[in-house]
Image: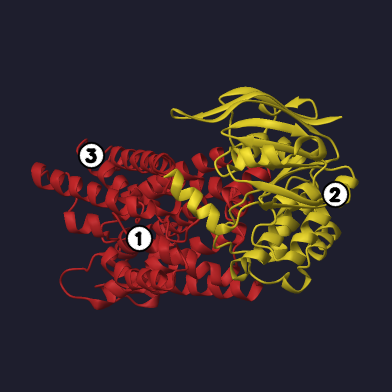
Chain colours: A yellow, B red
Amino acid sequence: MIAVEVRDVSLMSGTATLLDRINLEIPESQVTTILGPNGAGKTTLLRVIAGLETATNGEITIDGRSTHAMSFAQLAEKRSYMSTNLPSDVPFTVRDVVRMGQHPWVKPNESLVDRAIASMDLGTLAHRLVSSLSTGEARRTQMARILAQVAPLMILDEPTNGLDIAHTELVLGTLRDSAANGSTVVAVLHDLSAAVRFADHVVVMKGGTVRSAGHPDDVLSEELLSDIFELNLRMVGDRQGRALMILPADSPGDRTRLAKGRQ
Amino acid sequence: MVARWIGLYAVFVSIVVVSLFVGVANLSVSEVWNGLLSGIGLDGGARLTDGIVLNIRLPRVIGGVLIGVALGVAAVGLQAVYTTRLAEPYLLGISSAGGLGFLIGALFGSVGGAPVYPLVLAALAGSLLALATRRMAAIADIGQGMILLGVALNFVFLAWTLMLTYALQSPRLPTFVYFVFGSLGTVTWPVVWLALPLVAITTIVIGRLSRSLDLLAIGHDEAISLGVDVNRVSVFVLTATGVATGASVAVAGVVGFVGLLAPLIARRFVGPFHRHLLHASAVVGAVFVLGSDILIRGIGGNVEVPLGVVTAAIGGPLLVVMLLKKRVL
């Protein structure tokens, strides 16, 4: 089953083409990660799918229904969205913000709010003001809000940004569990090794276009990744056991010389 | 929480009562009481003191409450839309735009003693500028830095107000100093009756959006993802803000810093949720304006200090402290 279908979507900003005729299918109840270098259009694509930006051309459907035909309130029942930027100076407590995740639903479910707080290891911080939290704690608060929204499609822009390794695992594990329970997860991740380990489906982007999409084993190769990131990359480890590492083939000194050579 | 509301309203009622007693004429409790009764036809109404209470002090007090409510509520709305606690009608230039609109309207004269044209043009100019600030913030992609643009706009409208006043020298235009710094000294019933429904309607409009404003306060992307039509809510709030500010300008001229101080204090009393915050900011705004006005009348002298001078004297240092604490940008 297809959860999200992106048909011929382009987005222009002035004369710049941010997304160029993107066609994409995001499978239901799976974890899809979007990979690519800075400026590839990953965040823009997520925002267009989430309905935060309107495509210049093309159409996006969620569960077979065009997002154009849905109000913001209807969209909020279908998808949740986490921005890569953490809002500053939020005057509410952690619990208040997580409870706001229930906004799209008529009757707030307090036990769901409690579960979301506990699952993101925020129990002791529930009554702290979000503005007083560290970056990682604020990120987990946003994640708990997403969980409390219980939308069948979760769209996340770098959900592990600013998290330590234990909390990165916690967030990725929680998202995998959500997919196992029927949610569709789409996330931009910059940690390539984590992205491969975590994903059922990958989308590789560059220059506002999709270069390749499919199962990580079918799509990801040293050649493709090296080409995309313009850097020699090596894949080390066990692909089947999901213990794959993607590392630069050259030492940092070599790369500096390479960059200087390009200038 | 109940005790805090009782405390807030106790301060409000006390300050309203004190306001009725402070002024050049030294009135006794019975004189003020009889004056109020005469207004509802329960007493003679022919005494000089009745006229002072009914036609000078009462419109002055109600006018003060109106502008306090209007600016307190408008500021809370603006702060949610711009996600900064520095946003308020004066610092964004909305008050000055309303002021210029009022002056242009004043050239058309009044209708039966009521400043209909000035008030309509003040509300229109305030709303248009409030909506324009959002467009400008989007074009320049400056978001919270909008305040700097607002300060620049403030100077532009002030300059045009000054130019208009000097160039035309019209007896229809209000006294410049009292207009650009605000004063409750010239409040009359006709302007109170005109401004009252506008302030009431805009307060209700912004109040009905309080849940959406809560979500805006955690970030615009977050609000959209939770189902808020941010564009629509912002347009409603900014239009209402401009109308409320325009109405306040028609009552007492351009009064600054009320919108900065009222939400700040209100937040400490009732927390960040807008259903309570809007209400408390309205009450604190009214208390601040009436308190400043009592101070002005208490200072005495032959010439009254403009209201905006006192609110700026209190609010200006507060702004400096807020900036130094870096809690607002």
Amino acid of disc 2: Ser
Is there CB contact under 8 Å for labels 1 and 3? no
Label 2 is found on which chain of the structure?
A: A
Subunit of label 3: B
* Disc 1 and disc 3 on one polypeptide chain: yes
Q: Amino acid at mark 3?
A: Ile
Determine the CA span between mark 1 and mark 2.
68 Å
Q: Amino acid at mark 1?
A: Leu
The disc placed on residue A178 is: 2
Q: Nearer the viewer, residue A222 or A78?
A: A222
Q: Which residue is mark 3?
A: B104
| Rendering coords of residue A154 (x, y %) | 75, 44
Secondary element type, mark 2: helix
| Residue B82 locus on image (x, y percent) | 48, 51
Residue at the extreme right of the image, as rendered: A181
Residue B17 seen in the current view: yes
Q: Are marks 1 and 2 on the same chain?
A: no
Judged left or right of residue A151, residue B270 is left
State left or right for residue A67 relative to residue B194. Answer: right
Name the residue rendered at 62%, 38% in the picture. Answer: A227
Q: Residues within 10 Å of mark 2 (few under 14, many from 20)?
A: many
Q: Quadrant of the C terminus of chain B?
A: bottom left
Q: Which of these two is toward me, A225 or B66?
A: A225
Name the residue tied to disc 1: B54
